[in-house]
Structure formats: structure tokens, C-alpha cells
């Protein structure tokens, strides 16, 4: 996600791992910078493959390691471009779950 065209996402690396049936997904976001970041900026953002079953699901933080935090109740739509927060010098694992 570090596209080099601006400073908004410098120091951020993100990747996803999904089950073969597309029902389960985890997104890992690493922020090595000294500022809070998102997994995208301007026209650049993380997109998930269309075969994932994301309809009616959200991404929630399951694990946060580092100096910052993401509220446990935070949730982000699993459909569309992902703009997931990454606190200062942290690693965040987001898990896809059904929206409540």
C-alpha cells in the first residue's frame, strides 16, 4: 500500500489471507511510521478479490500490537476499497465477521 506518490501512506504494509471458500478473511496491517495511517490515500486503496463473500460483513480489529490502539467496537465495511486505520508503530489484524 505504500505507493510512493504521497506521504499519506508511507510506512504501511497490508495483506489479506482468506479461506478457500471465501467465507473467512483476515487483513494484517503494519504501520512502521511514527504517525497514524490508513491503508489507502487519494485514489489508492486496498481492494479485495471479488470471489470473497463480503456482502453483509465487516472487518473488526482482532489483535493490535504496538503503541497505538483501535477501538474494539470499530468496524469497517468489507465491501469496496478498504481504508483501515493503523496506529503509530503498530500491527493490526482485522477479522471479517457478520455485520450486527
Image (cartoon, rainbow, N blue to C red):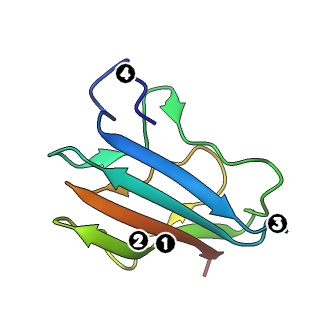
- Identify the residue under disc 2: 74
Q: CA distance from mark 2 to mark 1?
A: 6 Å
Answer with mark 4 or mark 1, whichever residue precedes in sequence: 4
Q: CA distance from mark 3 to mark 4?
A: 32 Å
Answer with mark 3 or mark 1, whichever residue precedes in sequence: 3
Residue 28, image x, y percentages: 47, 60
Residue contact between numbered discs 4 and 1, judged by CB atoms under 8 Å = no
Label 4 packing within 10 angstroms: few (<14), some (14-19), many (20+):
few
Label 1 packing within 10 angstroms: few (<14), some (14-19), many (20+):
many
Label 2 packing within 10 angstroms: few (<14), some (14-19), many (20+):
few
> Element at badge 2?
loop
- Identify the residue under disc 3: 20
> Element at badge 4?
loop
- Identify the residue under disc 4: 4
Q: Is residue 51 above or below residue 4?
A: below
Residue located 45% across and 67% down the image: 93
Residue 33, image x, y percentages: 21, 44
In the figure, is residue 60 to the left or right of 53?
Answer: left
> Element at badge 1?
strand
Residue contact between numbered discs 2 and 1, judged by CB atoms under 8 Å = yes
Q: CA distance from mark 3 to mark 1?
A: 20 Å
Along the viewing direction, whichever of 38 and 31 lies nearer the viewer? 31
Answer with mark 2 or mark 1, whichever residue precedes in sequence: 1
Answer with mark 3 or mark 2, whichever residue precedes in sequence: 3
In this view of the protein, can residue 4 be seen by the observer? yes
Q: Quadrant of the C terminus?
A: bottom right
In this view of the protein, can residue 69 be seen by the observer? no
Q: Is residue 98 above or below residue 90?
A: below
Label 3 packing within 10 angstroms: few (<14), some (14-19), many (20+):
few
- Identify the residue under disc 1: 60
In the figure, is residue 47 to the left or right of 31?
Answer: right
Amino acid at each position: 500500500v505504500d505507493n510512493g506518490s504521497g506521504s499519506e501512506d508511507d510506512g504501511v504494509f497490508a495483506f489479506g489471507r482468506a479461506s478457500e471458500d471465501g467465507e473467512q478473511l483476515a487483513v494484517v496491517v503494519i504501520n512502521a511510521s511514527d504517525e497514524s495511517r490508513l491503508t489507502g490515500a487519494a485514489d489508492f486503496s486496498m481492494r479485495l478479490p471479488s470471489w470473497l463473500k463480503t456482502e453483509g460483513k465487516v472487518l473488526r480489529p482482532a489483535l493490535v500490537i504496538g503503541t497505538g490502539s483501535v477501538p474494539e467496537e470499530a468496524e469497517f465495511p468489507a465491501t469496496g476499497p478498504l481504508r483501515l486505520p493503523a496506529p503509530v508503530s503498530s500491527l493490526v489484524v482485522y477479522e471479517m465477521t457478520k455485520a450486527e
